[in-house]
Each structure stands twice: as C-alpha cells, then as structure tokens.
Amino acid sequence: MERNDLVLPGPQAITPVSRPLPMVLIGDEAFGLHKHLLRPYSGKQLTMKKRVFNYRLSRARRYVECSFGIWTNKWRILHRPINMSVEFATDIVKACVVLHNIVRKRDGYKFDDTLSITSNLLRMHSFDQSHDGIRAYSIRNEFADNFVSPEGELLWQYNKA
C-alpha cells in the first residue's frame, strides 16, 4: 500500500445515489489512515456520524476477525508470519481459500470454529499528511456521510453507536 502498487478493483458506488468510492481495507486504531485503508475516528467527544461510522467499521472488522479465526484454527500456516515471496504467500492464501470451501461444503458450518480467534496482524506505519493523507481523510468522511444518509443508513445503527 505504501508503494501504491496494490491492485484493487476500481471505485464503486455503495448506494444507487452515492458517488463511487475506492475499494478499502479495514483496520483498527493501530493502523495509519490511507486512501485504501479505513480506520476509526479517534477521540471521545465524537459526533453521531463519527460514532455510527466507528460502529459500522467495528462490525465489519469483527466479521473479518471471525473469518480469520476460523482459518487459523484450520490452517496452521496462518499461525505465524509467512516468510516467503509475495507470489508464494499469495498461492498459500489461495490454497487456503480453496481448501476452506471444500471443507465447508463437506462438513458444513461449525460454531466451534469461531470460538478461538487469534489475530497477529502486522501494524502499519502512520501515513503523513501529504496529498494521499488528505485524500484518506476525505474518503473516510465520505463513507461516514454515506452511513448516515437516507440511502446508506441502517435504522438500528443509532441505538448501537
């Protein structure tokens, strides 16, 4: 991401009336904000819009962490950093996806898979306030605006934020 060589699909509208937004990864407070990485707003005195954004981001992160927890329980290779070339590591992850789908088709979904979630994510360096940094803040604000718009809101989200 820091080298801007991450290959992601192009921007997409997330509601029928919103303008296209870039594809993003999600992170927590330990990650730096980047145009392709959303992190929560920090601080305690947040507006409702920012609290809703943080809630929606946290909810999405929980799904990812749960999925990764299921994978690490099944595939021991994911218990530690993969110290191999990017190409070979990509092949390993693709193999895990294929094997996961085969096992799920054969065995079905087991709740026990979700009970032991481990997450050893590498922390990213903070990004500076360059043009990309300013763009990253703008993108996060656009997602936040969308989450409280009539087209993007979930009526129950205000009770959770």
Image (cartoon, rainbow, N blue to C red):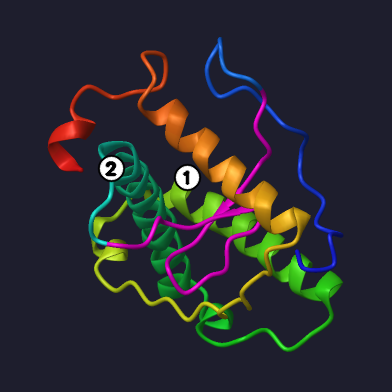
In-front residue for pair 112/37: 37
Indicate left or right for 120 with 98 as reference.
left
Horizontally, is 2 left or right of 125 in the view? Answer: right
Relative image position of residue 118 (x, y in whole percent): 38, 77
In the rendering, at what x and y percent does residue 84 appear? 79, 85
Q: Amino acid at mark 1?
A: Lys
Residue lying at the far top of the rendered structure: 17
Residue 29 position, x and y percent, is 42, 68
User: Which marked residue is nearer to the observer: mark 1 or mark 2?
Assistant: 2
- Tags 1 and 2 in contact by the CB under 8 Å rule? no
Quarter of the image with the C terminus in it: top left
Q: Is residue 158 left or right of residue 81?
A: left
Q: Taking the image as drawn, is residue 35 in sight? A: no
Task: Tell me if residue 19 is in the magenta stretch.
Answer: no
Give the residue at x 64% y 20%. 19
- Check disc 2 and give the amino acid type: Thr
Which secondary structure is most common in the magenta stretch?
loop
Q: Which residue is mark 1?
A: 105
What segment carries the magenta color?
20-43
Left or right: residue 33 compared with residue 105? right
Which residue is pictured at 52% across the width and 17% down the height?
15
Residue 45 to residue 147: above or below: below
Judged from the image, the secondary structure of the residue bearing numbered disc 1 is helix
Vertical placement of residue 158 versus 97, above or below: above
Q: Which residue is mark 2?
A: 47
